[in-house]
Image (cartoon, rainbow, N blue to C red):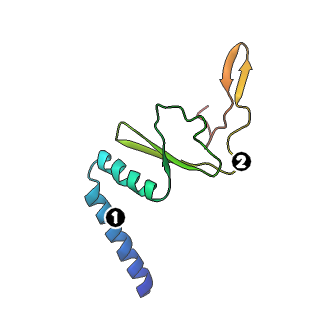
Amino acid sequence: MNSLSKAHLQRQAEQLVDFVNKAPSPFHVVDVCRAWLKGAQFVELKEKQSWSGAIKPNGRYFFTRNGSSIVAFAVGGQFLKPVSKKTSSGFLQVGVQVYGGGLW
């Protein structure tokens, strides 16, 4: 291992220790991550408010739940299906794609 990679590993270890010291609980983790995301130009959304018109192509967003969990996501340039509303057998459905394989 050369000195550059040792220095890199040392820096990563120090960053991990710093994170653990700043975030000893899920609530602290959410606060630290919220600050990181805002610093990276992510837009905070409120989970219980309408996102209609708030989500834009190439946007970066996050929301929190109960102060103990955080979800961040980025939207591509050609985002969302143009028509996800479907009706079949008298039921209103939402057309989605399964990620990672379903539990059939």
Front-most of residues 35 and 85 = 35
Secondary structure under badge 1? helix
- In the image, is 11 to the left or to the right of 98? left
Relative to 15, say whether 79 is above or below. above
Residue under the point 61% across and 37% down:
53
Label tally: 2
Residue under the point 61% across and 48% down:
75
Q: Quadrant of the N terminus?
A: bottom left
Q: Is residue 8 visible?
A: yes
Residue under the point 53% across and 31% down:
50
- In the image, is 48 to the left or to the right of 22? right
- Percent across and percent down for residue 22 are 27, 58
Residue 46, numbered label? none
Closest to the camera, between mark 1 and mark 2, is 2
Query: Sequence-wise, which precedes: disc 1 or disc 2?
Result: 1
The picture quadrant where one finds residue 97 is top right
Outermost residue on the bottom side: it is 3
Residue at the disc numbered 2: 78
- Percent across and percent down for residue 27 are 30, 45
Front-most of residues 102 and 99 = 99
For the residues bearing labels 1 and 2, Cβ distance under 8 angstroms: no
Residue at the disc numbered 1: 16
Question: How far apart are labels 1 and 2 at the CA level?
Answer: 35 Å
